[in-house]
Amino acid sequence: MIRALFLPTLHRPRPGLSALLRRWHSLHRQRTALSQLDPHLLEDIGVTEAEARREAARAPWDAPDHWKL
């Protein structure tokens, strides 16, 4: 288990299907919440309404590489 932390990313075991589905569901919930924020709250976090709409429209499996396990 500890050895896996030191392996290069390409050699780490892939997450199981249930972990993948949980990650996608979590990302979907976060994007839904982002799409429902009021304009003044978006301004507080430095995101425009257009950026929030674009991010919310992305598919759950469409996440930047640095977000993935």
Image (tube, rainbow, N blue to C red):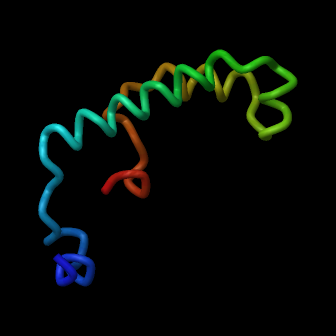
Q: Judge by depth and name the residue closer to the eye, 8 or 36.
A: 36
Number of numbered discs: 0
Residue 67 is situated, as x and y percent measured from the top left of the image, at 42, 52
Residue at 36%, 35% in the rendered image:
62
Residue 12 is situated, as x and y percent measured from the top left of the image, at 17, 68
Residue at 38%, 53% in the rendered image:
65
Residue at 25%, 84% in the rendered image:
6
Residue 46 is situated, as x and y percent measured from the top left of the image, at 79, 40
67 lies above or below 12: above
Q: Can you name the residue that lies furthest to the front here?
A: 1
Examine the image and state in which quarter residue 51 appears: top right
Q: Judge by depth and name the residue closer to the eye, 3 or 9.
A: 3
Q: Is residue 44 left or right of residue 54?
A: right
Residue 39 is situated, as x and y percent measured from the top left of the image, at 82, 20
Residue at 52%, 30% in the rendered image:
30
Q: Is residue 62 left or right of residue 46?
A: left
16 lies above or below 10: above
15 lies above or below 29: below
The quadrant in which the N terminus is found is bottom left
Q: Is residue 28 left or right of residue 34?
A: left
The quadrant in which the C terminus is found is bottom left
